[in-house]
Amino acid sequence: MSHGHSPRCSECDTTAVFLDREHARHLCAAHFSEYIEDQVLATITEQELVPPGSRMAVALSGGKDSSVLLFLLNRLRDRLGITDLVAVTVDEGIAGYRDETMEAAGSLCQGLRIPSICISFNERFGETLDQMLVGREHRACSYCGTFRKRLLEEGARRAGASLMATGHCLDDEVQAAAMNVLRADIGRITRELPDKGRGPFIPRIKPLSGLMGREVALYAMLSGLYTELPECPYTPHALRAEVRGILNHLERDRPGAMRLMMQNYGSFRECMRRKAPSLPLGRCLQCGAPASGESCRVCTLLREGSAGSEVRESQPLHR
Amino acid sequence: MQVRFSGGKTEEVTFREGTVEDLLNHIGINPVEVIVSRSGAIIPDDTWLYENDEVLITRIVHGG
């Protein structure tokens, strides 16, 4: 087996594991990990995302992104003044997929000695995601995202958290931005950012939002956090999968394209916000959760799902 | 060249020599979507590969 040209780390001249295309440099495992930790710390401190004394809930699916998030926040907790970390895991009920990721989430919490709360779609809504989606698989992400967000909020409240962190990386953010523009979803584009404490919600922060998905994956591998997990069976139905492919091609041909797009989206968003300010939040008439109309998204989808049978309502979240 | 993929599949690919990126382009994989190792060690995209190298291509799996 040959080992001809092996690139060397630009910092210390040892064997490199990563080519940083944007900055045209190589990094070894140690310098790459240091770079990732510095980036996350910079995102948090520059945007003042974590007030000292925070009791933080971390949305943990068991996949690489949320696992890296929990691992890094645990590592940085003293420097950030985080008093407590609690993992919140939602079991959507996806056969052949979720069991393995749930197991990975449980093992990580056990290894890091971090308490966790787990809530399932089945216990909360009386059905698994698989059952909800029969005949409407193409809407998997709408259903899953809406209900999961609600349960994460409930889990964070149950944990007494003052803040909730999610593992969205730069790729996720750019994909969401592109989909908002494709759908001309002005409501989402102009919505106040949740890290500013949008209305009655627990403020949500995204400490990995400055990192490419590939960087997060590599950090997970180098830190022993990467487990080969199955892909969500609903991915082929998702618009996001197509958008992701297009954006990844752009990133391959123009390194840094995603970062630039996200910066430009921020300016676009500000401009749109001035032209179309977001509506103030009221309360859902069915469950009392925050809503921009008479009915929150959760109750709307639950009604849709039970069309023809007795209409269910979600349990009150806010009293 | 013998190429293993995460998930267990192995393929024999005609590739004499070139960079990791050349190999990935040759087999139609976007480098942004994978991480490549040789003999258990993760390697950057501009690492030079030879015909008798054994590489593992790990696809970075995302949710929906």
Image: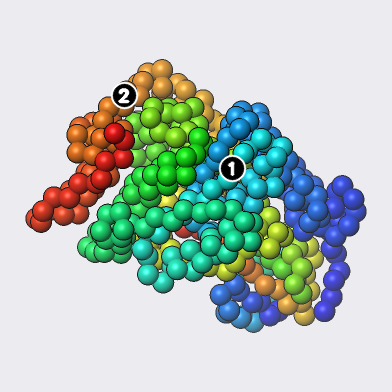
Which of discs 2 and 1 lies nearer the camera? The answer is: 1
Q: Which mark is residue A279?
A: 2
Q: Secondary structure at mark 1?
A: strand
- What amino acid does circle 1 point to? Asp
Q: Is residue A288 above or below residue B27?
A: above
Chain hosting mark 1: A
Q: Quadrant of the N terminus of chain A?
A: bottom right
A98, B54: nearer the viewer: A98
Q: Residue at x 36, y 58 (%)?
A: A120
A287, A252: nearer the viewer: A287
Q: Are marks 2 and 1 in contact (CB under 8 Å)?
A: no
Q: Is residue A191 above or below residue A118?
A: above
Q: Which mark is residue B35?
A: none
Q: Quadrant of the C terminus of chain A?
A: top left
B32, A53: nearer the viewer: A53
**Where residue A295 appears, x then y in whole percent?**
22, 36
Q: Which mark is residue A84?
A: 1
**Where residue A92 appears, x then y in whole percent?**
37, 59
- What amino acid does circle 2 point to? Leu
Residue A245 in sight from this viewpoint: no
Direction right: furthest residue: A13
Q: Residue at x 27, y 60 (%)?
A: A127
Q: Is residue A296 left or right of residue A309?
A: right
Q: Is residue A146 left or right of residue B24?
A: left
Q: Is residue A156 left or right of residue A54?
A: left
**Where residue A75 appears, x then y in whole percent?**
69, 47
A36, A105: nearer the viewer: A105
